[in-house]
Structure formats: C-alpha cells, structure tokens
Image (cartoon, rainbow, N blue to C red):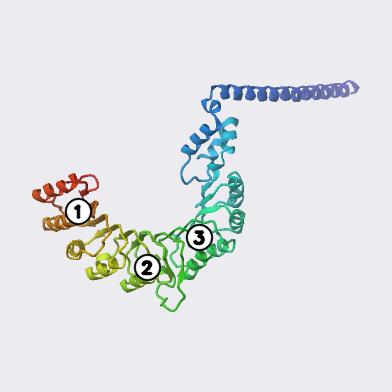
Amino acid sequence: MRHMVMSVAALQEHIDKLAADIVRQESVLKDLWRSKGAAQRQLNAIRDPMARMPLEISSEIFLQCRNSRPEPSADQPPLLFLNICNGWRDIALSTPALWSAIHADKPKDDLGSILVTWLKRAGGRALSISLPTPVTRDIAQAIGYYTHQLQDLGMFHDADDIRLIAAKGPFVFLETLTLAGVPTDSVPRCSISHTIEMLDVCPNINEYTLANVFYADDYYDHDHFDIRVLPCIQHFNLGRPDDASASSAVVLRRISLPSLKTFYLPVTHDLPFPKLIQFFTRSLPPLQKFIVGGGSWNAEWTLSEMKECLALLPTLTHFEVQPIGQHVADGFITTLGSSPHLLPNASAITFQPFYPPVEWYQKLLTVLSARRDQIRIVQVIWADNPYQTREAPPQDVCVRLRQLAADGMEIHIGTEQRNYI
C-alpha cells in the first residue's frame, strides 16, 4: 500500500511538472507567434505601397474608396480599413474626413455608442448623419454632443423621433435637412406641426427635402395658422410620392420661402392650385429652377392655371415638367408662342409629353425660332409608354431644328438614348 501511495504521489508530481512545461512552452509559442506577426507586419509595410505613400495620398485613396453614404458595417469602409493591418488602421484613424459622414438608417442596439465613437474620430469636421427610426435616447444624446458640427441631417418624419432630436437643438450650423416618411407606417403618426417643430430648431438650413410624408392632418384647413417665414432655404425638394397617400406638399400652406431658388414639386391632389398660387404670392421667391413632377398634373392643373403660376416667376431660367399629358404640352408651346412676356429669362426648358403628334413639332420650331436669342437648351424627352407609338419630327422640321443647333442651341428630341436632332 505504501509503495502504491508513493507511486501516485510521484505520478502527480510528474503530471504537475509536465503541466508547468506546457505552460512555459505555450508562453514561448505565444511569443513566437507575436514575433512572427510583428515581422509579417513589417514585411507587409515594406511591400505595401500604401505604407510607403505620404499620409495625404493614402488618406485620399481611402476617401475615394468610401461610399458617399458610409454605413457602420465591418465589411464596408471605413470600418473595413481597421481590420486589414495596423498600417491601414493607422491611416484610417489619422484621416478625420473618413469619419465625417455616417448613414445609419438601420436600427442597431448599440448605435448610440457607435455614433459617439465614429463621430469622435472625425475631429472638428462638419458632419453628415442619417438616422434610423425609431430614434432612441442614446442616439439623440449622441447627436446632442455634435450640434456645433452637424451640417447635414437626414431622418424619418416620425413624431417621437422629431421630438427627441428637436430637443437637442438648435442646430444653427445645419445646412441640409431631409425628412422622409416612414415607409412601414400604415397610419400617419406625424402632423405639419412636427415639421414646423423641426424647422424651428434648424434656422439656417439652405437645402430642405421633405419626401413621401403622409400627414395625419392633411385635410385640415391650415389658413388660420401662422405662416413660418424661412429666409435661408434656397433649395426645396418635395420628392416624388411613392403612392397617392403621400401629402408632403401640404406643408406649402404653412410656410414662406422668400429666398427659394430651386424647387422640385410633385403635383398631387393634396395641393389645390389656389394654395400653390398663395405660396408663390406670399414668398415672391427669386426662383431660378422649377421642376414639376408628373403625378396628377394633367388631372389637376389647366393650361390657364399653369400660365398664371409661371407669370409669378419672372426670374425662372430653368423650367421642367415631367411627365405631362399632350394637351398640356401643346398648350404650353402655344402659350410661349403667344405670350412673349411669359418666362422672359428662361434659357432651358424640358418636358416629357407622352405621345407628341407631328404637328406639335412645328409649333415647337416656331417658338424656338422666335426665342432663339433667349432659349439655349431644349429637351423633349418622350415619357415611357410601351403601348404608344411615337413619331419622329418631320424631316423638314428636323432640318431647321438642326440649323438652330448649329447656331448654338442645345436640342434633344427623342428618348433618353436617342436624339433625332
């Protein structure tokens, strides 16, 4: 029995010694792997042309590889650069411009902390941020840290989201604001008052996009509300509605834009013509570019209404309507020919008739010939209609239009791919 006990003790001692040797060897192995990794990184740095470049050049290459709307994803720049090698990581972290924009429109549990880390790397750069819905308090708090740097903000037009973000304002350095309708919302959860609330904390925005918003109060009479004068907005995009429920244009009943220069307006049933006239009358903007979307244009606006609207915009240089019914296209050309004082400064005109007949091109030629010293760019882009055969302009009209083109007028008539002139 004593011999057996001693044998067990000896075995245990031997096992302990082996275990200690294993620990020592593992430590040596770790050191070897660490040394190999360091040597490999040194070799990579020697071989890697990026590491031999000045930081200014390698940083610019990284910036060119980054998407204009970078997402916080490990398989996309700039986060991808952090996981290639130490050299690339150092370059990425030494390039604040890489981190000056983040497109985080997909919810993440830790997005608040991601935003703080990401935006800190941008240093003092101006920031461009897109937010998801719902906006959590952590996300709103992260935005609050950078109100003095925020230049471009995009978010969904959700009542709770707007309250959380607006509470972190004012955003006096913000230049561009985008509010988009929540696509999954079947029941409207926002009103025009929420739009106004957000605009009130963004007093200096230059560019404003309000797209695909379905207001819960779009059927209310807004005439008794105070008009918000927004003197800094020069570019306003109401977007193209995805469906008939979008009612973004209702906001025009509540605002005045006296500095507006470019305006994209989808004509929908929620904006009767008199309301648009009221908007232009009280704003009196120095509008230069007016793009009118298709929607229900030829169902809601008559030629006389269009003429009255354009008469309020003598500063207009670019006018575009797409797509439009042929009766409106025909009337528009007729009006230009008979009203020399309409659009006196227009130099570029674009419209998309569905199926212009050959007679229409003769009217177009007459107008262009009369205004050859004024109009420099003309585009007649046929709207997509596979069930309608389109006819090219008559040959004699094409010859005379080509003469105008030879004299310097840019003329495109046909499809996007084919120009008959």
Q: Position of residue 151 (x, y in %)?
A: 52, 53
| Secondary structure type for disc 1 | loop
Q: Which residue is mark 2?
A: 284
Which quarter of the rendering shows the N terminus?
top right
Tell me if residue 371 comes above or below residue 7 in the rendering.
below
> Furthest residue to the left?
396
97 or 220, nearer to the observer? 97
**Helix, strand or loop status at disc 3:** loop
Q: Type of residue at label 2?
A: Leu
Instruction: Compute the Cα span from label 2 to label 3.
Output: 19 Å
Nearer to the camera, 257 or 418: 257
Query: Can you identify the residue that label 3 sits on?
Result: 204
- The answer to which of marks 2 and 3 sits earlier in the sequence is 3
> Which residue is most to the bottom?
224
Q: Earlier in the sequence, mark 2 or mark 1?
A: 2
> Which is nearer the eye, 129 or 245?
129
The residue shown at (64%, 24%) is 38
> Of the residues tagged 2 and 3, which is closer to the observer?
2
Q: Position of residue 142 (x, y in %)?
A: 60, 54
Q: Secondary structure at mark 2?
A: loop
What's the CA distance linking mark 2 and mark 1? Answer: 28 Å
Q: Quadrant of residue 55?
A: top right
Left or right: 55, with 236 as reference point:
right
Residue 372's disc is 1
Q: Is there a contact, CB below 8 Å, between mark 1 and mark 3?
A: no
Q: Amino acid at mark 3?
A: Asn
**Residue 318 percent location from the top left of the image:** 30, 56
